């Protein structure tokens, strides 16, 4: 509001991705901490699940969603050095229960 001190916002483009990757690395680098029965038997990153929010179903974002999802998968493959990274995609329904994007 005008006349009030502006509070810093802890958000920037790419923050969700950075947080996602940080959390994955935190767990994968410390498996015994998160999984006490883990006995250093190794692991393989084979895939991920992506739960898509409803904000990308509206114009103009729905028109570029597929391109952005392909880009996300490619970047994850590069960041985690996994050339064949499998993904499962689940759209979330909108507030009215419609999970279809707009044209």
Image (spheres, rainbow, N blue to C red):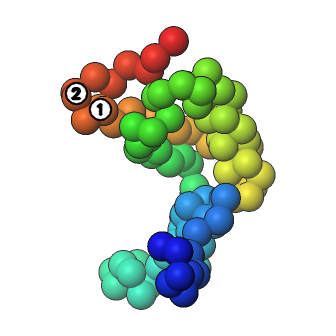
Name the mark on residue 75.
Answer: none
Between residues 11 and 48, which one lies in front from this camera angle? 11
Establish if 41 lies above or below 14: below
Q: Is residue 67 visible?
A: yes
Residue 82 place in picture, x, y as percent: 70, 50
Q: Nearer the viewer, residue 89 or 77?
A: 89
The outermost residue toward the left is 97
Q: In which quarter of the image is residue 99?
A: top left
- Write down the residue under mark 1: 93
Q: Image point 48% across, 73% down: which residue?
A: 1
| Secondary element at image label 2 | loop
Q: Where is residue 49 in the image (x, y as percent from the top left)?
A: 45, 45
Q: Residue at x 61, y 59 (%)?
A: 17
As drawn, the residue found furthest toward the front would be: 3
Q: Which of 72 and 28 is in front in this view?
A: 72
Please name the residue shown 51% across and 12% down the image: 103
> Do the residues under discs 1 and 2 have CB atoms within 8 angstroms?
yes
Q: Is residue 1 left or right of residue 45?
A: left
CA separation in Å, label 1 and label 2: 5 Å
């Amino acid at each position: 509001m005008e006349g009030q001190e502006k509070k810093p916002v802890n958000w920037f483009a790419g923050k969700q991705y950075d947080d996602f990757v940080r959390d994955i690395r935190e767990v994968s680098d410390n498996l015994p901490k998160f999984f006490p029965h883990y006995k250093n038997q190794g692991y393989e990153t084979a895939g991920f699940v992506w739960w898509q929010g409803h904000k990308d179903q509206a114009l103009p974002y729905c028109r570029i969603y597929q391109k952005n999802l392909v880009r996300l998968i490619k970047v994850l493959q590069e960041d985690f050095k996994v050339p064949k990274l499998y993904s499962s995609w689940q759209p979330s329904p909108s507030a009215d229960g419609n999970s279809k994007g707009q044209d």
